[in-house]
Amino acid sequence: MNVNLTREADLLMELHGKQIVSAVLYAVASSAPRSTTVNLGEVLYCIASKRSAQSRAYLTEILFSDDFTSKHPLSTQKAKEQFISSILAARSGNKARVAINQFQIITRGLEGTSYGYATS
């Protein structure tokens, strides 16, 4: 990667990384159509794979915030921890997509329903 692009990417993540991750998480959890999950997942996977330390901090702070918890009461502490671990451990976009789909099913209350798994 070009040195200038690396500096620009660093600056972007420093200034807006948390907001980007937050927007993606809230969209995946509830606000965006499920058909956009693949695209949102790619964004999250790219950030997590390139900047794992920052990603861990952002994911933990956002997912365990009072705001996220109050808006997504079905996402348990265990589900959040599993999601963070799965995203950060993913070595391919496909594995990240599976983790995102599973988390989305939980946050949208579709776990255990035939609709949740048939459409994931």
Image (tube, rainbow, N blue to C red):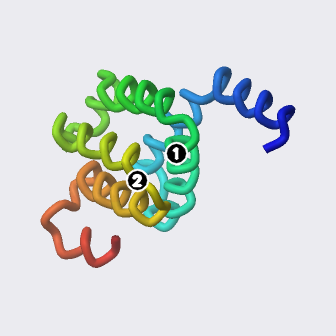
Q: Is residue 105 shown left or right of residue 5?
A: left
Name which residue type carries label 1.
Answer: Ser
Res 90 label: 2
Quadrant hosting residue 17? top right
Q: Eyeballing the image, is 65 above or below 9?
A: above
Few, some or many C-alpha atoms within 10 Å of disc 1 (few <14, some 14-19, many ≥20)?
some
Q: Quadrant of the C terminus?
A: bottom left
Dot 2 and dot 1 residues touching (CB under 8 Å): yes
Q: Residues within 10 Å of mark 2 (few under 14, many from 20)?
A: some
Image height of 80 relative to 7, above or below: below
Provide residue 2's location: percent of width, then percent of height.
Answer: 84, 40
User: x, y percentage for residue 90?
Assistant: 40, 53
So how many labels did they put on this image? 2
Q: Residue at x 56, y 60 (%)?
A: 39
State the residue at coordinates (70%, 27%): 10
Front-most of residues 98 and 28: 98
Q: Is residue 68 above or below residue 118?
A: above
| SS state under label 2 | loop
Residue carrying label 1? 49
Query: Where on the picture, by quarter, is residue 113?
Result: bottom left
Q: Classify the position of the N terminus by image quarter.
A: top right
